[in-house]
Image (cartoon, rainbow, N blue to C red):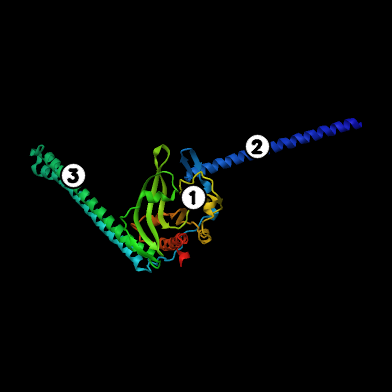
Amino acid sequence: MPEEEKEKVETVVDEDEFVDVESEKLAAEREAKKAEEAKKAAEKKEAEEAGKVVETETGPIDTSDLHLPAELQGDAVPRVIAVDEKGVYEYDNPKLSAMEEARKAWKKSYRLSSILKVGISTFCLLLIVLAWVIPTTVMGSSAGSVPLYIALGTAAGSLVIMALTSFLVKKKQNRFVSTYFHAFYKPMDEYLFEGLDIANVQGDVDTKLSQEEFDGGKAFKKTHNVGSRDSLTFTYKGVDAAVSDAASQEEGKNKALMVTFVGKFLRMHNNLKLDNGVIFYFKGNDRAIPPTGIIGATPAIKNDYYNVYGLGKDIAKIPSETMMLIEKIRTNKLLVDVTISIQSGRTYMYLGVEDTLMILPNKDQFNPNYLIAYKQIFASFLEIGYSLSGEKDKQ
């Protein structure tokens, strides 16, 4: 073959191979792009199903980056007190026993009132039937409309009795609930405070947390309402503090109310002077509800476990001792997520917790392990607040 033709064939072969390689490369890129888009779509769908897409005034925002990945999520609450062979908890503290006694007393009262209500309703229904059957049987064909009138009169009277019974029983059950709450929360608070340098405790289960105080941490955008109970004020090592069970709501899409927080609210005095404040958000599992004030905001510091929002000069004013304590915080199946808002003069801590700490036990025996675990959590956050008070420096 002449040299010129050989070079021409080789050139054609080289060009064909080049075109094939480019085609395969483009096809691979297209497939990779499709796979990436499919992955993003799947993640978006998963986020929506898990409630991680939040509707805001500017549109939906995916908050997946404010949740911990599965491999970093904390474990379940350890069983400090296990059930015996009969499935019963043996409490190691009289205050824990008192909480269970309160539950049993409420359950017994509630059951008796329910039995009374059902019994009276059943008796009234039986009267209505007898009011028809007896006149019909006794008077026979000559009864005419008499049995009907008697039955209707009995039915009217029975309905009045049933309605009155329902009203009185419900009123009585509401009193039982109030009594139960007082009898349960008093020993619970005493158990939480036991062994801690806490004094001057004021308030009870009926004391409410004001929306103004809840919003003082500037962690939420537009709180619509705050529900609360057991709002107590006290001093910890001489530092002014307050704690409360709380739940908040804001208006979401189409003005529908959405839950923005459920858990324990803790507030303490601090001696810092900050320009705009600093907010720490500790990520949690899919049950976590990031505060609306940070959704869509750019964190100044970001790591696997928490984000920090605020000015660098404010963050720099946080004592190293506080940062060491903060670094130890880890969320888990009980402490779902945490927001610590440090403002001038006050520290606000929003501890998102599971329902096992927020809902009083009903049918089942009181499980003390959640409260035992929370007692340690509560003490650790009191120390964080105390480290910001400046009281230690005075000693």
Q: Can you give x and y, in whole percent of width and height, for residue 57 in the image?
A: 46, 38
Q: Name the side, left or right, on which 376 lies relative to 94.
A: right
The mark found on residue 30 in the picture is: 2
Q: Which residue is mark 3?
A: 159
x%, y% of residue 146?
10, 39
Residue at mark 1: 275
Q: Earlier in the sequence, mark 2 or mark 1?
A: 2
| Secondary element at image label 1 | loop
Residue at mark 2 to residue at mark 1: CA–CA distance: 50 Å
Q: Are marks 3 and 1 in contact (CB under 8 Å)?
A: no
Closer to the observer: label 2 or label 1? 1
Compare residues 48 and 272 and report the one nearer the observer. 272
Q: CA distance from mark 3 to mark 1?
A: 66 Å
- What distance separates the C-alpha of mark 2 from that of mark 3? 73 Å
Q: Residues within 10 Å of mark 1 (few under 14, many from 20)?
A: few
Q: Is residue 113 left or right of residue 293?
A: left
> Which quadrant would the N terminus be assigned to in this image?
top right
